[in-house]
Image (cartoon, rainbow, N blue to C red):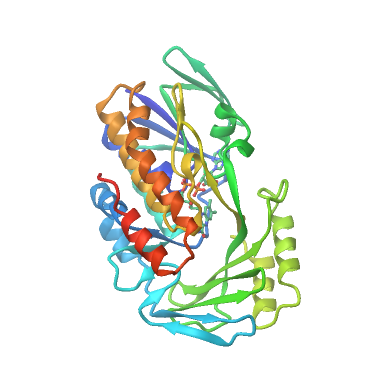
Amino acid sequence: MTTVLISGASVAGPALALNLRAHGFDVTVVERAPALRPGGHAVDVRGAALDVADRMGILPQLQAMRTRMRGMSMLDADGNELFRSEEYAASSGRLDSPDLEVLREDLTGLLHRRSAEAGVEYVFDDTVTALTPLDHGVRAEFQHGAAREFDLVVGADGLHSATRRLVFGPEEAFVHHLGVYVAVYTMENILGLDEWQVWVQAPGAGGGIYPARGNTELRVNLGFESGPIEGFHRDRQAQRAELARRYAGLGWEFPRLIEGALAAPDFYCDAMAQVKMDTWSRGRVTLLGDAGYCASPLSGQGTSLALIGAWILAEELGRLPVDAAPAAYETRMRPFAELNQALVKNEPGSPEADAAIEFAKSAIRV
Ligand SMILES: Cc1cc2nc3c(=O)[nH]c(=O)nc-3n(C[C@H](O)[C@H](O)[C@H](O)COP(=O)(O)OP(=O)(O)OC[C@H]3O[C@@H](n4cnc5c(N)ncnc54)[C@H](O)[C@@H]3O)c2cc1C
């Protein structure tokens, strides 16, 4: 049986694992975190990704777990309402759209459960430290586990992919910073929001806040403008301190929201960035999702790209030899990935942005 190692258990990794099991592959997923990582903003499953979810047999579950917002308000930095909409929510777009918005951790939980039930081996709390090409495969060394050989290795380990670094070199050559950091975390619903989002604009900062889990909690997304900060993405303490510094002195509910950031166990903060590479594969190693072609949360398409990429890669591996499949996957996927990366050029929420995303989200066949 063909053996595949996937690095990263978020969206792309477990989705590929589930699809590969359906094609009869022997799949191991290694995840650096000690368990599935909780938290995250609501993410969108759109256009062709809905067809993928249908074929994967997870569409009914995604429909059942969708967020149900009634609308949104845009506030200025003092909390004054600038406008409101009952037709549109900034996180997901039109509320009458067939697209599905779900909490990231609900999606990753579903994909992990389904793939583990299908026989995928999960190894948490470990990471690849070396990948050596063999005649017909790859030897993988791990921080904790014993070295193993696989027919194929797939890096689905996100924006700061270790697989990409080991095989293609330092991330500075591929990661393009978009000038903004975003922190995402959960706290109690101190704003009393009832299926309603608020988005706040402050100079150089701002973000969106919405309730989840039956209005019992808030998902807070606060951003700040900044160039790349050296060594920042692994240092939660530095991220919390920087967020507090950027929001110090702002009014409205910001002080209480920052208190929430300091206490949140699922606090996550990273740069808005894109990954651009000339090729996603080298030998028997290939990249999937954010690791290979991150479009950034500003595109609203990262999760759909991960699901569609995972479907196409598995399909090509199901019909072609392992040496040929990654190139066939890239040929089909690259134009779609580049189209979606181009979405961030538009002003979010503008008619141009809405039209571009409508076009881009279905500009591929699965
Ligand atoms: C905790 C978290 C919160 C997020 N929150 C949001 C959000 O609020 N909004 C949004 O739009 N996007 C968010 N994202 C990103 C979003 O999940 C992705 O853009 C998209 O779904 C594509 O998924 P992916 O699987 O390619 O990459 P990612 O979701 O980034 O997943 C990569 C996975 O690889 C793991 N990993 C990293 N390095 C290694 C390593 N060396 N060895 C093994 N495993 C490794 C990570 O722990 C993670 O589980 C978040 C990602 C994470 C990890």
Please say if 208 is above or below 145.
below
Residue placed most toward the observer, 244 or 272: 272
Give the residue at x 49% y 46%: 294
Percent coordinates x, y for residue 269 in the rendering: 62, 57
Give the residue at x 49% y 74%: 210
Percent coordinates x, y for residue 121 in the rendering: 42, 36
Q: Quadrant of residue 102?
A: bottom left
Residue placed most toward the observer, 194 or 295: 295
**188 relative to 289 in the view: left or right:** right
**255 relative to 23 in the view: left or right:** right
Percent coordinates x, y for residue 357 in the rendering: 37, 59
Q: Quadrant of residue 96?
A: bottom left
Residue 288: tell me if it is visible.
yes
Position of the C terminus by quadrant = top left
Extreme-top residue of the structure: 135
Give the residue at x 68% y 71%: 258
Please say if 328 is above or below 273.
above
Q: Quadrant of residue 71?
A: bottom left
Residue 129: tell me if it is visible.
no
